[in-house]
Amino acid sequence: MSSVAAKKKFFQSHDLFVKYHPRNKMAKDNDTTSSSGSVFNSSSSSVCTIYGSTFSRSSSLGNKKYFIACTSNGCIAVWDHQVSSGRDSNTSGKKSGPSKPILTVSVGGGGSSGIVLYDLQFIETNNGDHLLVASGDPGILIYNWSHFEAEISAAMDRDDDENSPRKPQDPPSTTMHASPFGLISPIATFKPHPSPATSLGESVEINSTSYNKSDNIIVGAAGDMFGCYQWDLATEKLLGTFGVVSRFDYGQGGHKDYLHVVKSLPGTSGGSSQYVTGGEDGSIGFWDGKTRRLVEMMNIQATIDKNKDLVTSNINYSRGFLNSNSSSTPSWNYNGLNSNLWVSSMDISNNWLAVCGGSETSNNNSIITSRSSAGGFTSGSGFITLWHLPTRTFTSGCITRESLNTVAYNDSLDCLISGGNEGRISFWGSITMLGQARGCAWSTPPATYTISIDSESNSMIVGGSGGILDCFMDRVKVSQLLLNS
């Protein structure tokens, strides 16, 4: 299957909802660029998509914390978290518009470059360094967070020198786009192998990353036949690849399609690092990090079909699926035809693994049309499942009306939170048992791709299609962030 054809499956095939929209023409047509083609303009913020986000640790700048997001326009944007969470004393009780970023770094020239960033991670290495890890079309970009702090401090100083008091809800926004990687250059860049899946043999994208602190190793889930790449962060050397079946596997097994997500598992008693992967084939794989050998592969659909007593559904029977009150159990199988499932996101809390994704089928009687199926495209449903990591056992699951794109555990609420293609986020039961969703909240993005949670402030930020992010405290939306220059 060609790279473009395969990627249509992951997120629904409507322009607002497509994660992998190679060189999106709509985004290009709406971008306003200078003669150099390097300005990320605010007019493009309404058509860009925010795929990844994270919170920084408390920084050296007055013990501040920041929220960071990456976009389909190849930009990394930074906001003051105290302002974005609505906790700034200067804005208490006042209405204000969406907060603008303090700093925006355009990778490869920004909106006109066609570069897409899919994932962000903030990590602390063994020697105490704080690094920002961005991944996407350029591969993996490793930034020293202190370089961002220096630019944030410089932006604040420039504002003070101009004697223009900064409104907390509208901080100065500095856009940087001078070099191929912006004025803040990565300290290391990891690129996948040249791929036969691309027309000119270029490298393909890295869809997500995970860092194993005990081994100082970073892994990246890629959209090619090599699957998951494993690099030594200290030496910057590629240690190997694993994850996808190839003719060189000699019967070891693996994923049958490209990967969307990889997570490092908590340390095991034997000391060997392990990873869990998920991708386009609708399976999750457990891997030994040292040998890069498969430990166990589990297909989501087969697992649900074998454990129907552990699965509920929030889809009405009259529209093709069984609801949670039915005496029967839900399934994607109709008249011997199976839907195509994919795994889009995972999150880990202690001994528990949450996995979500979506499905599509050509049988219109067995699917639910959601907001993302506008324009006559194939629609589908989704799923969320829970697994006990020490035993690698499936414990509960739910078939959802919408395709789910992201899942995260909220420690302060003791629940899982998911987002998909219906413009809402759902709050589930405790990490040990899913059951039915216990509530939902509407979100501004019509499709959600990233949920970041800061356990210290109990705040949560939701992003997706469009240039606005929603900020929640507990379950209540308190403010918004606006992506522009």
Image: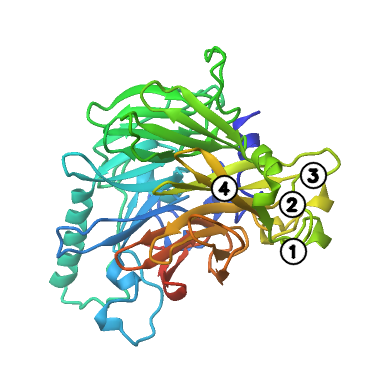
- Give the amino acid type for the residue marked by disc 2 in the picture: Pro
Q: Name the spot of residue 111 as percent of width and height, x first.
A: 44, 50
Question: Relative to residue 28, is residue 89 depicted above or below?
Answer: below
Label 4 neighbour load within 10 Å: few <14, some 14-19, many 20+: some
- Extreme-right residue of the structure: 335
Q: Nearer the viewer, mark 3 or mark 1?
A: 1
The reply to whether callout 2 and callout 3 are in contact (CB within 8 Å) is: no
Residue on which the image places disc 2: 330
Residue bearing mark 4? 395
Marks 1 and 2, how far apart at CA: 11 Å
Distance between the alpha carbons at the discs numbered 4 and 3? 29 Å
Front-most of residues 483 and 145? 145
Q: Secondary structure at mark 2?
A: loop
Q: Is residue 322 left or right of residue 170?
A: right
User: Type of residue at label 3?
Assistant: Ser
Which tag, 1 or 2, sits closer to the chain's start?
1
Q: Residue at x 40, y 63 (%)?
A: 484
Q: Would you name the residue on which mark 3 appears? A: 362
Instruction: Tell me the distance, in whole angstroms, between the alpha carbons under discs 3 and 1.
Output: 26 Å
Between discs 4 and 1, the one toward the N terminus = 1
Q: Quadrant of the C terminus?
A: bottom left
Instruction: Of the two numbered discs 3 and 1 on the same chain, state the one appearing first in sequence.
Output: 1
Of mark 2 and mark 4, the one earlier in the sequence is 2
Check disc 3: other Cα within 10 Å, few if <14, some if 14-19, many if 20+: some
Residue named by callout 1 = 325
In percent of width and height, residue 49 lies at: 50, 55
Q: Residues within 10 Å of mark 1 (few under 14, many from 20)?
A: few
The amino acid type found where label 4 is placed reads Thr
Residue 35 seen from this side: no
At 64% across and 51% down in the image, what residue appears? 310
